[in-house]
Image: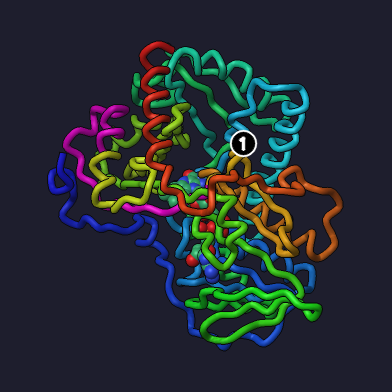
Amino acid sequence: MKLSDISHKDFELKPWWWNAYEPKVLDLVDIPQSADVAIIGAGYAGLATALELSKQGKSSVVFDAEQPGFGASTRSGGVVSGGRSVGKRYTSTSPAEAAHIADLRVDAADAFDLIEGLIRDNNIDCGWHKAGAFSGAWCRRHFNDMKSKVDDLNAVTEGDAYLVHPEQQREEIGSDYYRGGMVVNRGAHLHPALYFKGLLDLCQASDLITICAKAPVTDLNQSPAGWQVGTDRGATMAGDVVVATNGYTGNVTPDLKRRVVPVGSYMIATEELPDDLAKSLSPKNRAISDSRRVLCYYRMSPDGKRLLFGGRARFGQTDPAESAPILYKFMLDRYPQLKGTKITNSWTGNVAFSIDEVPHMGQYKGMHYALGCNGSGVAMMTYLGTQTARKIAGVANYQCAFDTPTMPTHPLYHGDPWFVPWVGRYFRTRDWIDRTFG
Ligand SMILES: Cc1cc2nc3c(=O)[nH]c(=O)nc-3n(C[C@H](O)[C@H](O)[C@H](O)COP(=O)(O)OP(=O)(O)OC[C@H]3O[C@@H](n4cnc5c(N)ncnc54)[C@H](O)[C@@H]3O)c2cc1C
């Protein structure tokens, strides 16, 4: 299948979300000489850190190498999970690990409350839609595993989760592709770029926050006087530094670069669909994903007129012109009725996987970080930024479960993710075995 066969006349290689809000370079302000806190990265994590710090009376300067929102935060699927994807690899391990994963899920559920409250209290107009999520079972074994997952989610996160047997599947999705699945009612979807704009507007309205676009941080030096944070346009002295660069973490923090593996995630948007067809794809307007290792995730646009379909078309970095036909095939596997539908957009962005597949906040050599969204960061990175700010301001009344003394790395990993395409091939093979024999 060629891109020219599936692309609409208005096709663009940019996020469909950017039709409503496209990240733009702000007026280039002078780099402030000092601030209480310097934040590297102006995505959800960086802006949430700045906002909570300003609530606590602390000033901050947020640096972004590009325009604020350039990273994953305006490119995502906008699916907000209530913690169902946290700690996937721990489902059947020791009691100690089971307790740890329960703590993580409780905090992930708090992340959902936090983002819901933030949007409501600040009237952020971003298509927040609490329609729940459907996760399709890739094979019968996954469906059986979902039984205990449903119990776990109901016990620790009040997820209002239940199993969907194969014969009921059509109530959730206009497809027979899966072997049943599960619903988590405590889930939502939003317009990621408008949510980002809402956070940015709040930051810009605060006298305590300075946002510096096109200011890549190139030097970080700690002295008894604090941190000197250097850019090509000048330097800031700050009492604390927060690294919020997730899938774009670079050489200025080499020790943290060794702790996250950047992986490309890819999306396409269809043209507007006939009403009946659009409504039949996700009858309850759920956010949909599957239990594959190489997962796909999809949902209707906020106006319900088009399908927005995402997944790991490739594991390494690939041109979205190349990923579009791959995703299109994945989409037809699930929805053969979309054959002939054109796509208007294809895009990509980086997510960051941690070695233990759990998001982390903490301190390394004195610098704070909030990193490792593991593909699900709309609520989580907002939450970790907020928790980091509360910790710096000394107002955190408990240590959140994602705040651990260390963030693991691997002795052979130094920040060059050369192996990612091979991992992708291995996962695809495991998926094929599960689907065929599982
Ligand atoms: C295609 C796609 C689909 C996704 N779908 C979902 C979804 O449906 N649900 C969900 O929960 N999550 C999803 N995610 C993940 C989610 O978008 C991210 O977890 C989240 O946006 C990360 O926010 P962040 O603030 O940590 O990082 P980012 O938004 O990536 O921001 C990091 C910023 O750091 C800046 N930076 C890097 N180095 C420097 C430097 N040296 N100096 C200054 N600035 C620097 C970058 O320019 C970048 O703007 C998806 C991601 C992608 C790419």
Q: Quadrant location of residue 158?
A: top right
| Residue plotted at (23% across, 33% down) | 338
Residue 416, x across and y down, in percent? 46, 53
Foreground: 408 or 214?
A: 408
Q: In this view of the protein, can residue 227 be seen by the observer?
A: yes
Left or right: residue 391 versus residue 256 is right
Residue 193, x across and y down, in percent? 46, 59
Vertical side of 125 occupied by 190: above or below: above
Residue 71, x across and y down, in percent? 47, 60
- Magenta stretch containing residue 332, yes or no? yes
Foreground: 249 or 80?
A: 249
Looking at the picture, which amino acid does disc 1 mark? Val
Asked if the residue at label 1 sits under 8 Å from ligand 1, the reply is no
Left or right: residue 33 versus residue 280 is right
Residue 277, x across and y down, in percent? 28, 33
Left or right: residue 380 versus residue 362 is left
Residue of label 1: 86
Foreground: 248 or 61?
A: 248
Quadrant of image for the C terminus: top left
Q: Quadrant location of residue 34?
A: bottom right
- Magenta stretch containing residue 383, yes or no? no
Q: Quadrant location of residue 314?
A: top left
Extreme-left residue of the structure: 5
Quadrant of image for the N terminus: top left
Left or right: residue 426 versus residue 1 is right
Identify the coloring: rainbow
| Residue plotted at (71% across, 45% down) | 402
Vertical side of 39 occupied by 399: above or below: above
Extreme-front residue of the structure: 412
Disc 1 residue crowd, few under 14, some 14–19, many 20+, Cα 10 Å? many
Q: Regarding mark 1 in the picture, which secondary structure is present there?
A: loop
Q: Please give the range of residues in magenta.
A: 328-352
